[in-house]
Amino acid sequence: MKALKDLTIQELISTEITDCPCGKIHKMPIHGLELGSNALESIGRVFQELTITRAFIICDQNTKQASFPLLLKELKKHSIPYQVFEFPEFHLEPDEQAVGSLIMAFDKSCDGILAVGSGVINDLAKVLASISERPLVTLATAASMDGYASNNASMIQNNLKVSLYYECADVVIADTRILAASPPDLLRAGLGDMLAKYTSICEWRISHLVTGEYYCENVADLVRHSLKRILDLADDLLTGDLQAVEEVFLGLYKTGLAMGYAGISR
């Protein structure tokens, strides 16, 4: 079989891997990734493919400021109507109150959800998309975490941090013009999230040896390969270099896919 690390991102998304030596069938229920400079220009086609005619946009003050100048221009160009729900909190928590606010504000005439943000917005949108049974498109505003491609939502339930599982976003749009303009701390967070994968892979392997937990060297190698590429570009990342930002986002995205392939959130 062709190693996962040698597959293109589109092959990783769309190909069902049935001949992995680990014996597990690897597949991801996600339609696509639009990544690169001017990736936002694909939103008209993406909405058409998902039959979204009216979008329910979820954002907060920061993600609105980061993306709306470009986003609203594209929505207007494609004559896409929308409704905006903006969280007023400066520090938003993914808890019952936030989910309740979304549900109460949701306009049933909207046949699709557009999540504008990164970690918390992304997770809250997964919950709403699952409950409302609407397709979900995520517009990434920072290369800060690996949850864009995963079906895992890190939520706070009864004051306890839990991992809940919903559908992945149908399509993720990652425009490097927006990603590169995010605060430096968020770029560092993305790099740090990737560096932590070295420990994660070791823990996964140790658990396999000690407890017999499922382990796939093919999936682990996909993450290692992404890590190597990102480390090579680490110095350029904090200067806002578009290529470095794109590679870090791609590495984070592949890590999310890897978690989905393995069926775990480690």
Image (cartoon, grey):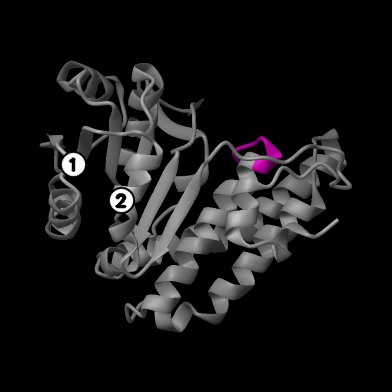
The residues tagged by marks 2 and 1 sit, at their Cα atoms, a distance apart of 10 Å
- Residue 10 in percent (x, y) is at 58, 56
Q: Nearer the viewer, residue 238 or 57?
A: 57
Which amino acid type is shown beneath numbered disc 2?
A: Ile
Q: Nearer the viewer, residue 139 or 108?
A: 108
Question: Looking at the magenta stretch, what is its main secondary structure?
Answer: loop
Q: Is residue 263 above or below residue 8?
A: above
- Residue 12 in percent (x, y) is at 64, 52
Mark 2 Cα shell of 10 Å, populated few (<14), some (14-19), many (≥20):
many
Mark 2, residue position: 43
Left or right of 106 on screen, residue 33: right
Q: Which residues are magenta?
A: 261-266
Residue 251 inside the magenta-drawn segment: no
Q: Residue at point 41% right, 49% down?
A: 172
Q: Nearer the viewer, residue 222 or 202?
A: 222
Q: Quadrant of the C terminus?
A: top right
Mark 1, residue position: 80
| 2 and 1 marks in contact (CB < 8 Å) | yes
Q: Secondary structure at mark 2?
A: helix
Q: Quadrant of the N terminus?
A: bottom right
Q: Is residue 13 above or below residue 98?
A: below
Q: Residue at point 33% right, 32% down?
A: 125
